[in-house]
Image (spheres, rainbow, N blue to C red):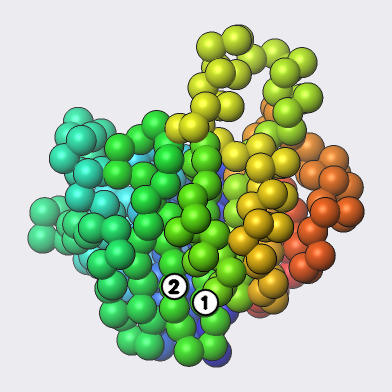
Amino acid sequence: MLKWAVLGSGSSGNAYYMSDGETSILLDQGFSLAELDRRLIRFGSSVDELDALFVTHLHPDHARGAGILARRCDIPIHLHTKAITHNAREFAALGIPSSQVADVEAGEVIRLGTMNIFCFSTSHDSPGSVGWYIDHPDQQVMLLTDLGKTTEEQKELAQKASVLFLEANYDEKMLEYGPYPRFLKKRIRSVEGHLSNDQAFSFVQESGFSGNELYFVHLSDINNDPRLLEEQAEGLVSTPFIVCEKNRWYGTIGAAQ
């Protein structure tokens, strides 16, 4: 049986855990090793049980802990080839041992136990940015975060998914009337920025997602509010959903913290 957990979501750090009892993986690693282990222990696991890490992109809140995890656990670190070749300085700073770097192309399938895992391109201001899809006999899990626009390919994947982790980064009015400078607001709204609440709702509707679990993730601390997002989603999203708040953990085992 596949289980999963949101270990952290947002600008302070991101990590998503998947395990079927035989194979355990992590999607993104934006925490110190000690903090990651503390969060994994909450869900009955530890860093020593991880078999691989899959990185969406090299922004620090998603990748700052990739190198230390690799050096501690001697596991492969999967990321898109462009994330390495087009972000040479940022990639080198992570200190991932070369023998553990597993560069992949979009659509290339990695088989770990009974999991088939592949990435798909996303539109974000970090070269080689991707989302990840886990095809398991029990569940099909999709992580779609840090992107400014969605694609038909992504909608087709979401339609098949049973679990969807979907970015809902900002409320349009909160961003417009908030404290950010105009250039940063423009960046967030751009096709290489982030998804708004309205864009996330449209994606759910247009993709026909009808899975078991929908998690809204990567909420902005400044430009969004969990209660507001929940109220907005109530009238627009028909599937069960969870709004993931900062410094709380969610998953199929254990209660939210």
Q: Quadrant of residue 212?
A: bottom right
Disc 1 crowd rating (10 Å Cα; few below 14, some 14-19, many 20+) is many
Which residue appears farthest toward the left when viewing the image?
Answer: 99
* Residue at left offset 22%, top offset 44%: 82
Q: Give the vertical position of 94 relative to 98 (above or below).
A: above
Type of residue at label 1? Answer: Gln
Please report whichever mark, 2 or 1, sits nearer to the chain's N-terminal start.
2
* Residue at left offset 72%, top offset 41%: 198
Q: Which mark is residue 134?
A: 2
Per the model, the C-alpha gap separating discs 2 and 1 is: 6 Å
Q: Is residue 144 left or right of residue 95?
A: right
Work out whether residue 240 or residue 39 is closer to the camera in this orientation and state it: 240
Q: Quadrant of residue 158?
A: bottom right
Q: Give the vertical position of 2 relative to 143 (above or below).
A: below
Residue 46 drawn at (x, y percent) = 45, 70
Asked whether disc 2 touches disc 1, contact meaning CB atoms under 8 Å apart, the reply is yes
Type of residue at label 2? Answer: Ile
Disc 2 crowd rating (10 Å Cα; few below 14, some 14-19, many 20+) is many
Q: Does residue 256 appear anywhere in the picture?
A: yes
Q: Does residue 48 appear anywhere in the picture?
A: no
Q: Is residue 62 left or right of residue 71?
A: right
**In the rendered image, which residue does mark 1 sit on?**
140
Q: Secondary structure at mark 1?
A: strand
Q: Give the vertical position of 107 relative to 125 (above or below).
A: below
Residue 180 drawn at (x, y percent) = 64, 15
* Residue at left offset 36%, top offset 61%: 119
Q: Secondary structure at mark 2?
A: strand
Work out whether residue 155 or residue 41 is closer to the camera in this orientation and state it: 155
